Each structure stands twice: as structure tokens, then as C-alpha cells.
Amino acid sequence: MSETDKNIASDDVKTLHKMGYAQELSRNMGHFSNFAISFSIICILSGGVNSLAQGTSGAGGASLGIGWLIGGGCALLFALGMAQIASAFPTAGGLYHWSSTLGGRFWGWLTAWMNLLGLITVLAAINVGTYLFFVGAFGAALGITDTYATKVVFLIVITGTQALVNHLGIKMTTRLTDFSGYLILGGTLLLTGALLAYAPTHDISRLWTFTNYSGDAGGGVWPEMASIGGVFMLGLLLPIYTLTGYDASAHTSEETIDAARKVPTAIIHSVFWASLFAWIFSCAFVLAIPNMDEAAKQGWNVFFWTLDQTMPGPLKMVIYGIIFVAQYLCGLATVTSVSRMIFAFARDNGLPFSDTLKKVSPKYRTPVAAIWAGAILAVGFVAYAQAYSVVVSVTSIALYLSYSMPIAAGLFAYGRTWTVMGPWDMGGSFRIVAVACIAIALTIFYIGVQPPNDLALKVLGVIAVITALVWFGLEMRRFKGPPQGSDIEERKALIDAAEAAVGQTKLS
């Protein structure tokens, strides 16, 4: 670490102390690493590939050619809103802390649970998607068939190794996620170039042509609907689900040098570049499809069918290998994000077994218990992964609600109780962005519970009932939230003890 970085890191630690927290995690991440961890979770070679059927079996080419522009624009608004708040409050578990500070302890507690639900289910969905991709790409050659037992073993192995890498320290994790960032960019360019080179046609009108492929025409991905607008709206779940996870930059704020400046721009850049490359790849994919009607009938198998129809075998297998590694690293980065959220919530005693979950390993400077807890919960969610599209819906709704909650709190606190902004500040434009984000989150909720994902509404309903019972029955009296006011001064001795326990020095 350069002398300049040491001085900046020292200022970061002082900022963290002012919010009442110790520097227990190791602050070594630079700007690219903070960007790469969000970019790796977004991973357009994961959700953007595994969920292609939601577009092609929906409104056809327009679902990708137009849908990605709309979905990317929506996600970028959320990124702007989150960046504004992240700059003012650069802490691990950012969303929870932001909501608590700007909207009160109940709003923060609820945000934490929604974000945790979204992160755990997205980890499950990512690794289930990786499994399905692996079976589709290599299953026949390796003699592997899709069975429940095979899936569970596969998920235990890959999620376990992802947790182990995280356990061993942020340096190893960031090296892999940095590599993942380059791999996703290079792999997407290779895939896009190959699709265009072997495309039987370059009929660009497909990109804005709406065709109703609901029902049997789309392989049963969506139930039959008369409204092309309704089908197009369902297809927006493809970009909406793919463009999640960029809160990881905020969750790793306490491991990033110059977090108040670097985290906001990392959030924005990860969404912008992921959206752009995903749109380019998706357009190339639509152009490469030999026959749109036949492709739609393939349903969830549309990606493999298209590559089988267009590409030479050796090139196809190279691309499959790149995509599989990218998807694995996507899950790896998601474990990092989940664990930092669990750690941050636990250190404010917001979870059962908080005393264990908030502990940081002095050797590895990672929240070991939080890492393994997140991994185990994601594997436990596998029973719901039988209906992949339902998992995608629950994940999208939970995450975007958790994204919108601190932004909504910021809207009402801006200029009132929230008067000190961070170095990244868009000024009064934040209010416009915040209103747009709230409207988009409500729209995502509506889209996400439409058939065949109406089970998602039941799942969310059960979660809402449990949440109300837990809050009013227990947490309303017990949970204090993040330290505020005089509490911060009283925590000085605890901060010193926590930092001494992990060997923290001012410039580490």
C-alpha cells in the first residue's frame, strides 16, 4: 500500500469510528476491485444467459433489443440513488445502515431482512443456474443427468468452495473477482463476436419486433396471455434479475480504500457497463437465432439450442467453459456480499446468534461464521429452486424493495434530518431519482407476482406475516439499531478492544 493510500485508509478508519464501528475487516480493496465485485455478481454470463428464455419466450426479439435498454435504465437510476447515500455512509451492510440512519430502526431492520432474503435467494438462484448450465453444457459428455440428488451434491460442493475462498481472506477473493471482471468482459466479447460471425441472418428488425410467444409457442415459460404488453412486462424480469447485486460495492465499503469516493462510482460503473455489454450480447443472440419461432419453442433450453444450431463444436465448448467459470465466480462474489450483510446486521445484534455471526477471524480478517451461515442458508433454499422462475421473482422483488427502502427514507430525510452529504453528491436531483426508484420498485413487485410466479406472492405473504410477528412480538423492544449520538462515544472502548483483537493498526 502506497503512503498516499495509507493516509486515505487512515481517514477511512476515522470515518468508520465516527459511525460507531471498529475497523475489524481488512481495508485493502482498490477502486477496480470494488467495481469488480459488483460486476461479478451482476455477471451477464450468469443471469443474462440462464434467464434468456424469459425474453425469447415472452415478446420475442423486442424483449431483448428493447427490454435490456429499459431494464438497464431502471437499474442505473437505483445505482445513482444508492451512490448518493453510499458516499455519505460508507459502511458494511450499507443498505441496512442507511435505512436505519435515515428512516429509523424499524425501517432499517426491515431493510436488512429484505436484503438478506434477496441475497440468500440470489445466491441459491445463481448456483442453481450454474448447475443447470453445467448439466446443459457438459452433462451429456460426462454422463451426468439432472436429478435432485445430483443438484444438491453439486450445490454443496460449489457453494462450499466459494465459502472456503471467502473464509481465507479478502485478498484471495478480490484477486478472483478482479479476474472475473476481465473474464466477463472478454467472454462476452468473444460470445458476441462468435454469434455475429456465425449468424445465418443479420435482420436487425428482430430487435424491435414484438411477437407473443406466451403459452405453448414459448415452451411454456409463460402462461398464455392475450396482451403483448403484459408478455413484454414479464420479459423484463430478464434484465431486472440479471442487474442485481451491485449493492456488493456498498457491503464491502469497510474493505475499500477511499470508500466515500470509490464505492459510489463503482456502483454506477458496474451497472452501466454490465447493462451495455448485456444489451450488445443479447442483440447478437437475437440476430444469431436461425428461426425465432423454433427458438421460442425451446423454452429454457434456448441458449444451448441456438449455439448448437450456429457454432462449431470446439468454439462452443470454449465459450461454455468461460461461462461456467464466470458463473462460479459470480457465486463466489455473492457469498462475499451475503456475509458482509450478515456481519453488519449481527454486530448491531439484529440476528439470532449475533455474538457468533459478528466475530471476525484475527488470522484471515473475515467474518467466518457469517460466511458459512450465508452459504448454508443458500443451499437450504434449494428446495424452492425446483421452480427457477419463482426463485428469480422472489429474488428480484426482495432485492429491489431493499434497494428502494433506503432511497425512499433518503427522499424524506434529504435536507431535513439528512443535511451532510458525502463527496459524491448529485444535489437536488436525488429527489427526482428517488421518486423514480420507488415507482420502479412497485412495478417490479407487480410484475414479479404474475402467473406463473404467483407462488412468489404467497412466499412473500408468508414472509410478511412472519416479519410482523417477529417485529411486534420481540424486536420492537429488543433491537436498538446502529449506534447513534451519545452511543457512539460510549463505544470507544469497545472499538479499541475489537480492533486489538484482530490486530488492526491505523494504516492496515
Image (cartoon, rainbow, N blue to C red):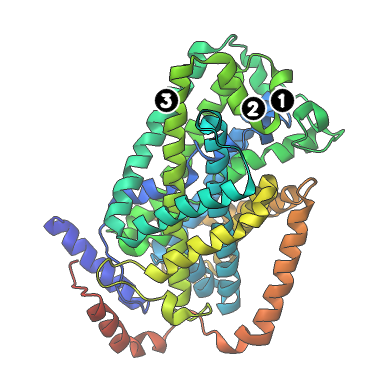
Q: Earlier in the sequence, mark 1 or mark 2?
A: 1
| Residue, disc 2 | 302
Is disc 1 in contact with disc 2, using a CB cutoff of under 8 Å? yes
- Which amino acid, mark 3? Val
Q: Which residue is mark 3?
A: 318
Which numbered tag is attached to residue 296? 1
Of residues 497 and 507, the one nearer the viewer is 497
Q: Amino acid at mark 1?
A: Ala
Q: What's the CA distance linking mark 3 and mark 2? A: 18 Å
Q: Residue at x 57, y 52 (%)?
A: 152
* Disc 2 element: helix
Label annotation for residue 451: none
Closest to the observer, 416 or 228:
228
Distance Cα–Cα, label 1 vs label 3 = 25 Å
Question: Quick check: can you spot residue 104?
Answer: yes
> Which one is in front in this view, the residue at disc 3 or the one at disc 2?
3
Which numbered disc, 3 or 2, marks the residue that appears first in the sequence?
A: 2
CA gap between label 1 and label 2 equals 7 Å
Q: Mark 1 or mark 3: which comes first in sequence?
A: 1
Position in image of residue 463 (x %, y %) = 70, 68
Report the quarter where the N terminus lies. Answer: bottom left
Question: Mark 3 Cα within 10 Å, few/some/many (few <14, many 20+)?
Answer: some
- x, y percent for residue 92: 41, 66
> Callout 1 environment at 10 Å: few (<14), some (14 to 19), or many (20+)?
many
